Image (cartoon, rainbow, N blue to C red):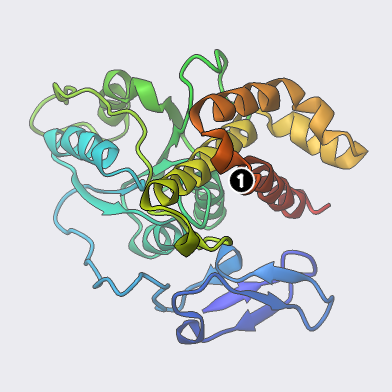
Amino acid sequence: MIVKCPKCGAKYRLDPKKFSGKSPKIKCKHCGEIFPVYENVVDWEGATPPSEGKKETPPPSGKANAIIATANSELAGVIEKILKSAGISPQIIRDGIEALYRITNQNPSIAIIDVDLPRLYGFEVSELVRRNDPQKNIKIILIGSIYNKDAYKRSPEYLYGADHYIDRHTIEEELPGIINQIAPSQEGKVSAPSETVPEEKPAPAEKKEIDLSSLSPEDQEWVKKAQRKARLIAADIALYNEDAIREGLIHGDVYERIAKDLKAGREHYEKTIPEHIRKLKDFLGEEIEKMLEAKRKEFGL
């Protein structure tokens, strides 16, 4: 595969087998920039990304196809039923890096991407896919995480290359209409399934930086929930504050500019995560910093 330095543009050919099961970074020999490998792939060259030992699933043929990228199994099931009723064959991916690879290489008709994906945020996947598909041959639908459906009453400021955006709690109402617009069913208009969209449930946690072995099974689950909740909140703040984050990073006052949404997120986090788990580590603060660092690189700051 070929990766490109986000700072100076230097390109490197790498063997993905050397990075299997990891989220690696390399240092550019030209400018010294240290950058993540998979977020900067410009040509996979037939390479296979780390997929936790799962077998390759070939893309469906003979009819319109879609990739559903979400770590939430129940949510994936709801979307899958809507797509199948429209005569569209779906493939479910549960990881951000693997979603980027599959979408880039398989060129599905539609990519439905959850903002909250492990290892690579959904809005980052959307932006990278669109960078490689400027003609918009792939229709991208971005699903907002919305940790609290009453938290935001406005549309996202920036869609990261996506063609459409849907809040998670309105999928059943909005997705069938969007599917009818971009890929009408040959068997008639698609309608929503009878099931309701499930409440958010934690997906398998990413690499943990604290020793869970010393915790009780119950607290181990709470740590996973805290990590998941923190990622949800950070994803929503990024989605709804694009301009504020950019200006704040430029002028050095980013926390003041996103203070309102950050406060709301923090309050929600503290209401849903027990105090003794929050004291183990500031999962939310760490996730916000990760998001802001990704934005710094995105904006070239």
Q: Nearer the viewer, residue 270 or 293?
A: 270
Does residue 129 sit above or below 153 in this rendering?
below
Q: Amino acid at mark 1?
A: Phe
Q: Which residue is mark 1?
A: 283
Q: Nearer the viewer, residue 174 or 75?
A: 75
Q: Which image quadrant is residue 39 in? A: bottom right
Which residue is painted at 79% across and 71% down in the image?
A: 33
Q: Which image quadrant is residue 233 in? A: top right
Give coordinates of residue 52: x percent, y percent: 35, 71
Indicate the secondary structure of the residue bearing disc 1. Answer: helix
Does residue 189 sit above or below 296 in this rendering?
above
Left-right relation of 153 to 136: right
Give coordinates of residue 259: x percent, y percent: 76, 25
Q: Nearer the viewer, residue 187 or 71?
A: 71
- The crowding category of the residue bearing disc 1, from other C-alpha atoms within 10 Å (few below 14, some 14 to 19, many at least 20), is many
Give coordinates of residue 299: x percent, y percent: 76, 48
Which residue is painted at 50% across and 74% down in the image?
A: 22
Left-right relation of 257 to 167: right
Q: Nearer the viewer, residue 5 or 254?
A: 254
Which residue is painted at 74% across and 27% down in the image?
A: 258
